[in-house]
Amino acid sequence: MLLDLYIIYFLAILPAIFIVIYVYNKDQFPEDKSEVVITFLLGTSIVLFLDLLIPVTEVFNDTFFDGYGNIAFMEYFRAATLEETLKFLVVYYYAYRLKNFDEPMDAIVFAVAASLGFAAVENVDYVFSGETQQDSIDIAFLRAFSAIPLHALCGVIMGIFFGLAVFSDRNNQRNLFLALSVPIFIHGSYNFILSIGAGVLVYVLLFALLVKASNIFSALAIDQEIRGQESLQKRYYINQTEIYMNVLKITGIIIISVISIEVFTGN
């Protein structure tokens, strides 16, 4: 029935929207809602670029790797690196250039919005892959407590380091690198754990990240109360070359790691 399809679609996108609203409301000096919505929608557009990049990546992977190396490359590069880099570019090319992007909490809000925009579209694909209506509902509930929070937490971490890169007085380039590399590592590890059948560890990872994110939110909220309405001046300006170099570094690290796995496992 058409009504059933709408219900399933609603279940697929609701967790992402709920978390965006939650994070937005944690900001004591919230941004323009329309800017957050646009960031969310730009996040949904990531799938269009992935449709172009993934086939090339898969050909490369199947040509050079197999066994655990194949799995590692698929999860750490094909999935995590491509997705997190595109989310990062949404934050850089849109949110970072906004006049309202004026404090560290803003980086978290926009990064989460971009991450969950993508996660919502991805979740629809997964949910509707169920063979029956009950399968789709089961997938929706399972991912509401696993994949969706994972994308949200990666957005939080990306936003933390991006905000430090922009507003901190030191270690700006290192924080910019971490804004990309840490979410990629966490996202890739999550996927890899699932791929090798150790799914219970996923919830341990998510719980640890949730506790850490909650502590950071509390610290930032206290900082906002202390500062009041005072705006921070952007102290560090990110340029495109730095982003490209970071992506190349991360890609090189992943490829070298995958080759090491190939040699170690004898595949």
Image (cartoon, grey):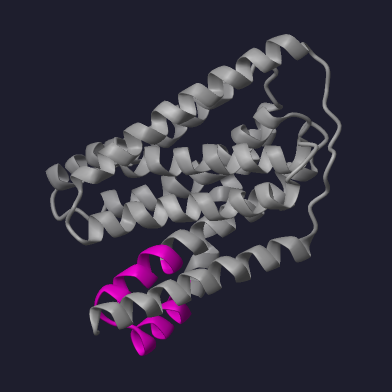
The quadrant holding residue 165 is top right
Q: Main secondary structure of the magenta part?
A: helix
- Is residue 68 magenta-colored? yes
Q: Position of residue 21 (x, y in %)?
A: 51, 25
Q: Position of residue 34 (x, y in %)?
A: 67, 32
Residue drawn at (24%, 45%) of the image = 201
Tell how many labels.
Answer: 0
Please indicate whether residue 8 sits to the left or right of residue 135 in the image: right
**From this viewpoint, which residue is outermost toward the front?**
264
Please indicate whether residue 86 sits to the left or right of residue 259 in the image: right
Using the image as rendered, state which of residue 33 and residue 176 is in the foreground. Answer: 176
- Quarter of the image that includes the N terminus: top left
Q: Position of residue 77 (x, y in %)?
A: 45, 67
246 up-or-down from 32: above or below:
below
**From this viewpoint, which residue is outermost toward the bottom?**
63
Q: Position of residue 260 (x, y in %)?
A: 37, 77
Q: Which residues are magenta?
A: 54-78
Using the image as rendered, state which of residue 99 and residue 253 is in the foreground. Answer: 253
Residue drawn at (41%, 52%) of the image = 187
266 up-or-down from 153: above or below:
below
The quadrant holding residue 223 is top right
In this view of the protein, can residue 40 be seen by the observer? no
In this view of the protein, can residue 126 be seen by the observer? yes
Residue drawn at (42%, 72%) of the image = 257
Residue drawn at (59%, 19%) of the image = 219
- Is residue 19 magenta-colored? no
Using the image as rendered, state which of residue 226 and residue 123 is in the foreground. Answer: 226
